Image (cartoon, rainbow, N blue to C red):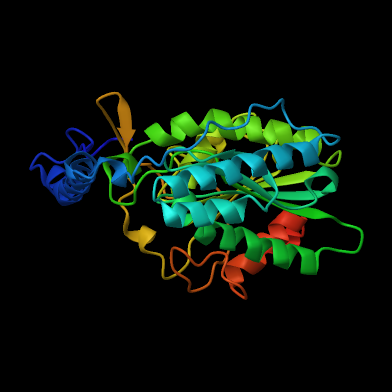
């Protein structure tokens, strides 16, 4: 993009009136970009990092397979239980309580160190015909995992209720990367997304080897998670790529993602992300800002209705956004309201 430069057509008006007309817009764009850069550099919160909670290393297992899926879950449950005991021994009572809860669930992956990583499966992944993968945005870790899990649970319940007879569904809550803090330098750059993308590609490949043949896979990417999905999108074997409350994806258009998937985007009427400047710039070897608004006509996604909800309401039970996301995951795309 032009990054705030004014480009008139030289010589079209000898009095310079056209160039003068472009200056306010150019100054506004430069001002917005400067504010974005300042936010990325000046907020001294070190990524809003929490305490580095001690925990055992994650279980080392081969890639999951249908026959060994229960064993995979069991190994990661045992690791979560051990992490809970370790956290309790060091006085991290809230973390210990969360990890004890996780130790009773279907964990495709668990790492209790630091902010923590969790991949949880809701439903029967080994026989699922429709699989939804949720990719979270900022401020998501083990300590806030229940909030993220609530979105996965809401979708899983809706899919179970509305799936046609004989269609099996699963939801995968993928907290597979260290998310940025909402108020931190990293939230305005692509660095965390670039680091996360290889892990998301591995997850999709693993699911393809486990789920039913020809299963339909949808990536549901919220907020900064949309930047992660965009970085992983090229050649990824998914059917639908859904951006919810996205600040931008780092791609100028949906075509730039180089994906065979249908690309969808939605933003609730009450979502503050609408006011994020859609600019980007290269700065010290990383990209600050995320470019084109995914719900704009310029981007080229299939924009669908998300109702009046705010930034955290896309999976609220009974919401229009959840209704439309459910239709996309089930493959009922003609019923999605635009």
Q: 176 or 168: which is nearer to us? A: 176
Residue 210 x %, y %: 80, 37
Q: Residue drawn at (46%, 41%), measured in percent from left and top? A: 227
Q: Is residue 315 left or right of residue 143?
A: right
Tell which residue pokes out farthest to the left in this image: 15
Residue occupying the point 66% across, 68% down: 323
Which x, y percent locates residue 170? 75, 52
Q: How many marks?
A: 0
Q: Where, by quadrant of the figure, is residue 321 drawn?
A: bottom right
Q: Position of residue 35 (x, y in %)?
A: 19, 47
Q: Nearer the viewer, residue 197 or 27?
A: 197
Query: Taking the image as drawn, is residue 104 in sight?
Result: yes
Q: Position of residue 213 (x, y in %)?
A: 86, 38
Which residue is at 70% across, 57% downward?
328
| Left-right relation of 65 to 151 | right
- 336 on left or right of 14: right
Image quadrant occupied by the C terminus: bottom right
277 vs 69: above or below = below
Q: Between residues 191 and 270, which one lies in front from this camera angle? A: 191
Residue name at image x 23 percent, y 36 percent: 9
- Please indicate, yes or no, whether residue 141 appears anywhere in the rendered image: no
Residue 184 relative to residue 170: left or right: left
Q: Quadrant of the N terminus?
A: top left
């Amino acid at each position: 993009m032009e990054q705030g430069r004014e480009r008139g057509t030289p010589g079209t008006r000898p009095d310079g009136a056209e160039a003068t007309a472009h200056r306010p817009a150019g100054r506004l764009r430069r001002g917005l970009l400067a504010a974005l850069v300042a936010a990325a550099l000046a907020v001294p919160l070190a990524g809003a990092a929490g305490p580095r909670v001690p925990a055992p290393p994650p279980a080392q297992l081969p890639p999951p397979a249908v026959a060994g899926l229960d064993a995979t879950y069991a190994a990661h449950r045992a690791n979560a239980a051990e992490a809970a005991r370790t956290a309790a021994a060091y006085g991290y009572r809230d973390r210990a309580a969360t990890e004890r809860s996780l130790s009773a669930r279907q964990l495709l992956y668990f790492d209790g160190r630091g902010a923590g990583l969790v991949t949880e499966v809701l439903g029967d992944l080994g026989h699922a015909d429709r699989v939804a993968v949720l990719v979270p945005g900022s401020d998501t870790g083990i300590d806030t995992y229940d909030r993220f899990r609530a979105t996965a649970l809401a979708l899983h319940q809706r899919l179970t209720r509305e799936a046609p007879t004989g269609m099996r569904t699963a939801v995968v809550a993928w907290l597979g990367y260290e998310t940025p803090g909402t108020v931190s330098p990293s939230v305005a750059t692509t660095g965390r997304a670039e680091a996360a993308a290889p892990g998301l590609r591995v997850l999709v490949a693993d699911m393809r080897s486990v789920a039913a043949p020809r299963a339909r896979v949808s990536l549901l990417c919220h907020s900064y998670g949309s930047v992660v999905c965009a970085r992983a999108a090229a050649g990824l074997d998914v059917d639908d790529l859904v951006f919810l409350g996205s600040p931008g994806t780092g791609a100028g258009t949906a075509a730039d993602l180089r994906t065979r998937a249908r690309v969808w985007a939605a933003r609730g009427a009450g979502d503050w992300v609408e006011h994020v400047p859609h600019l980007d710039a290269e700065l010290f070897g990383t990209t600050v800002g995320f470019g084109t608004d995914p719900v704009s006509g310029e981007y080229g996604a299939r924009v669908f209705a998300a109702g009046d909800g705010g930034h955290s309401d896309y999976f609220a039970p009974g919401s229009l956004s959840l209704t439309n996301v459910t239709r996309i995951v089930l493959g009922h795309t003609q019923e999605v309201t635009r």
